[in-house]
Image (cartoon, rainbow, N blue to C red):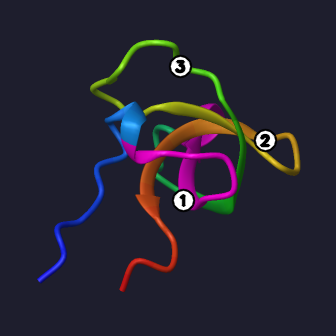
Amino acid sequence: MEKKRDGRQRRNISPGDMVRIVLKNDQRTGKLTDGIVKDILTNSSSHPHGIKVRLTDGQVGRVQDFGGDE
């Protein structure tokens, strides 16, 4: 059984990963946006609300989940 990756740990995220992020405007509703990581914006090794990333389409948000990890 594979352990689920944690979006709060920087080491689990790489450019090119398919992720689900919460945008700043969607934090209250929890609406998730799918995309592919272009840049990792959080410098620390972890963050309690998720590592902040920029997607290939330019949207910025915090990683909540990973796509394609069934």
Q: Earlier in the sequence, mark 2 or mark 1?
A: 1
Residue 12 in the image: x percent, y percent? 39, 46
Instruction: Indicate the quadrant containing the C terminus: top left, top right, bottom left or bottom right.
Output: bottom left
Residue at mark 3: 42
Helix, strand or loop at mark 1: strand
Number of the label disc, if any, that sits on residue 67: none
Residue 8, given in percent of the width and then of the height, sits at: 32, 36
Vertical arrangement, residue 7 with respect to residue 45, above or below? below
Give the secondary structure at mark 2: loop
Mark 1 against mark 3, which lies toward the viewer?
3
Query: Is 64 above or below relative to 28?
Result: below
Q: Which residues are magenta?
A: 12-26
Please tell me which residue lies in front, 44 or 21.
44
* Distance of label 1 from label 3 (alpha carbons): 16 Å
User: Would you name the residue on which mark 1 appears?
Assistant: 20
Identify which amino acid the numbered label 1 is placed on. Arg
List the residue tagged with mark 2: 59
Amino acid carrying label 2: it is Gln
Q: CA distance from mark 3 to mark 2?
A: 15 Å
- Rendered position, 51 above or below 66: above
Left-right relation of 59 to 13: right
Question: CB under 8 Å between callouts 3 and 2?
Answer: no
Q: What type is the residue that disc 3 sits on? A: Thr
Residue depicted at x 29% and y 49% = 6
Q: Mark 3 or 2, which is nearer the eye?
A: 3
Instruction: Count residues near mark 1 (Cα–Cα under 10 Å), then give few for <14, some for 14-19, many for 20+.
Output: many
Q: Are marks 2 and 1 in contact (CB under 8 Å)?
A: no
